[in-house]
Image (cartoon, coloured by chain):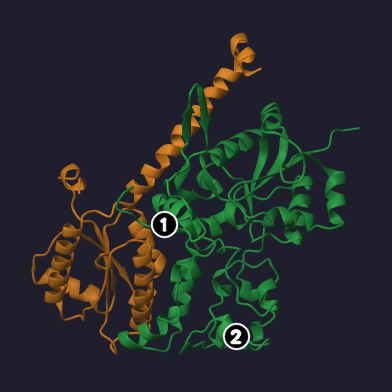
Chain colours: A green, B orange
Amino acid sequence: MPEKPKIAFYWCASCGGCEESVVDLAEDILMVADAVDIVFWPVAMDFKKTDVETMEDGSILATMLNGAIRTSEQEEMARLIRRKSKILIAYGSCAHMGGIPALANEFERSEILKYAYEDAPSVINSQHTYPEAVYQDKSRKITLPVFRNIVRTLDQVVDVDYYLPGCPPTPKLLKQAVLTLLSGKLPPKGTVLAPDSALCEECPRKESKPADLSFEHFTRPHMILSDPEKCLLAQGLICMGPATRAGCEALCINGNMPCSGCFGPTSRVKDQGAKILSSICSNIEAKTEIAIDRVLDEIPDPVGTFYRYGLAASMLRKKIAEEV
Amino acid sequence: MPEENINKKWEPKIIAFFCNWCTYTAADLAGVSRLKYAPNVKVIRLMCSGRVDPQFILQSLASGADGVLIGGCHPGDCHYSEGNYKMLRRFRLLQRVLRSMGVEDERVRLEWISASEGEKVKTVINEMVDTIRKLGPLGLPGKISVYDKDLAELKNEIDTEIEVDIKPSGKEMVEHA
């Protein structure tokens, strides 16, 4: 019997939702298990790093790696897995664009550690103890991974072949990706494995999106009872749909929530946040600075709204700090 | 700031996006009138300030510009009737984003300059170059490359280890066990 192709899953700075999405394949996971050997999947099966180290370079057909890269340990694992895999897939928003963890790029490492180890209301740390990367205890040297000053996307650390977008990717897209890998008919390197059109194209409320959209005010989901049939932008909600890639089949819209942009931009756009900013602003009614500012005040956190999943992959990448 | 010493030769780099109908014509006028202004601005002509995609501004900064100047027609004078208002709104919101990302307000400037205001092109450019000179370099590519040093260090470490692994010495194997 010919050997089955080998597949691996790994996680870095992530929440576990991507791992969950693999299980969400439901019965189809049996199809996957039949077709491939899963050789490494720390969240579900007992493998160690040494198991991967002993594998031949390039012996894994494909690894789906989720999570952003923040620590030296994650960098090391990403490099190891890259070496062992023929195809490396950035799985989910965090590996693809930084995701939620990359919002930390709005802060300095020192600010983050200070909050986590001193200022957070639930922390008592009267001795001001901070984790050290290296700790010498008599003759024993204890090490911890280094917490880097910037959150990175996977492709800012190692070469990535494909991207599977989403927070998390849908089971349908994962299944398609696995079938594509097994078919051997691979798309060009760097392809995002989802349709290359805006979410509005597949939105069930597309018909109700006015051609001459105009904003007098912005609102937020908890502030209104939104019409479940009507385009959310037309109701003054900031929906990332126009600047976001399709492929999720408008999951959030179907839950009556605006798109928050987890699939990232289409291939024609480099900076998702700048693009939605541009689109929204062209449709604001106000024409004077005072009136414009009054409307913009209704978007309390522009970076967190427009770059919710994409700060690490954005053009600026990280807040500019005096220290560095 | 130590940068003052390192960058003795540093000169502000400013990218300017001027609209074809007003500000670019004004810059032409400034040239024809032989007005002298600082040579730090690289002008890109667009048909309208409404064509200035915020991505252009971010990409300029990310590629090493210290400032970005946008020039359009006065309100009400846009050749395409609404383009400059779009730019104004994008500018106001982009400034909020830039502020959160640690970029000073003065680095991105929007000015309305009509075709006859050659003198204003000169004043605005000189002023902006002065302001940015005081602020110092933005130096985004350099800042990212500082972060990337750690990354390269670990990569080298791993690459060296792999070389050792290919030719393992008996002694190390014992140590691991």
| Residue A234 image-quadrant placement | bottom right
Tag 1, which chain?
A
Q: Which residue is farthest right? A: A1
Residue B146, given in percent of the width and then of the height, sits at 36, 43
Q: Nearer the viewer, residue A87 or A19?
A: A19
The residue where tag 2 is placed is A209
Secondary structure at badge 1 equals loop
At 47% from the left and 78% from the top, the residue drawn is: A280
Q: Is residue A184 above or below residue A23?
A: above
Q: Is residue B160 above or below residue A79?
A: above
Amino acid type at image mark 1: Phe
| Residue A200 image-quadrant placement | bottom right
Amino acid type at image mark 2: Lys
Residue A316, given in percent of the width and then of the height, sits at 40, 57
| Residue B103 image-quadrant placement | bottom left
Task: Locate the N terminus of chain A by quadrant.
Answer: top right
The residue where tag 1 is placed is A107
Instruction: Please tell me how crowded label 1 is: few (under 14), some (14-19), or many (20+) other residues with Cα within 10 Å.
Output: some
Asked if residue B71 shows in the view, the reply is yes
At 63% from the left and 58% from the top, the residue drawn is: A165
Secondary structure at badge 2 equals loop
Q: Nearer the viewer, mark 1 or mark 2?
A: 1
Asked if residue B16 shows in the view, the reply is no
Q: Are marks 1 and 2 on the same chain?
A: yes
Q: Which residue is farthest top? A: B170
Q: Nearer the viewer, residue B7 or A221?
A: A221
At 15% from the left and 79% from the top, the residue drawn is: B117
In the displayed structure image, the side of residue A233 where residue A16 appears, left or right: right
